[in-house]
Image (cartoon, grey):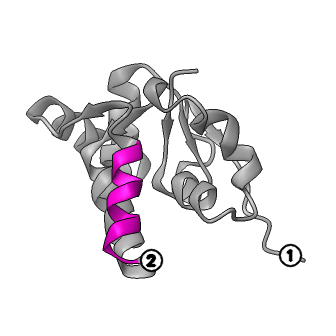
Amino acid sequence: MACLVDTCGWIEWLTDGRLADQFQPYLEETEELVIPTSLQFELYKWAKRERGETPALEAVALTEQGTIIPLSTSLALQAADLALNHRLLFADAIIYATARQAGVPLVTSDDPFEGLPEVTYFTKNTGS
């Protein structure tokens, strides 16, 4: 299924986090994924900080199997409009705009996306 899995989903999946099973079906077919370069930035930064350079490069190599979408002027302008309309921060707006422009759902557990159109949202269970 073509989609854009947000950085939080990649992290959950790579670390076998609490939501890993929910993100698993979306990440099984990496060649079907839409990957904004901003997601590669976030994932590499997190993985290098938490795991080191080799695991970070391996994570980015997985993303390279999908369709990479670089930031363009049209994408930046759409992201700015979405940021204004939905009060999204820069990276979130870029990721959401990329999904919208590609015509695929965004799969995430990040709270700013909850309730937005074309978003599959997984609630983070904070209780035990």
What is the spatial separation of the Cα atoms under label 1 and label 2, in whole angstroms? Answer: 27 Å
The structure residue drawn at horizontal position 41% and vertical position 66%, both measured from the top left corner, is: 55
Circle 2 sits in a helix, a strand or a loop, which is it? helix
- Answer few, some or many: residues within 10 Å of disc 2's Cα (few below 14, many 20 plus, some between 14 and 19): few
| Residue 109 visible here | yes
Of residue 45 and residue 119, the one placed in the foreground of this image is 45
**Residue 89 picture quarter:** bottom left
User: Relative to the observer, which residue lies in front, 108 or 24?
Assistant: 24
Q: Residue 32: x, y in percent?
A: 47, 24
Residue type at mark 1?
A: Gly
Q: Which residues are magenta?
A: 52-62
Q: Which mark is residue 51?
A: 2
Which quarter of the rendered picture does the C terminus lie within?
bottom right
User: Is 84 on the left-hand or right-hand side of 23?
Assistant: left
Q: Position of residue 79 (x, y in %)?
A: 27, 41
Snapshot quadrant of residue 100 = top left
Look at mark 1 in the image and give the residue it sits on. 127
N-terminal label among 1 and 2: 2
For the question of whether residue 84 can be seen, the reply is: no
Residue at the farthest front position: 54
Q: Amino acid at mark 2?
A: Arg
1 or 2: mark nearer the eye: 2
Place of residue 14 in the rendered image (x, y in percent of width and height, measured from the top left): 57, 59
Q: Main secondary structure of the magenta part?
A: helix
Query: Residue at coordinates 45% horizontally, 80% vertically from top-left?
Result: 50
Residue 95: image x %, image y %? 36, 44
72 on left or right of 89: left
Residue 36 image label: none
Depth check, front residue: 81 or 99: 99
Q: Is residue 80 above or below residue 11?
A: above
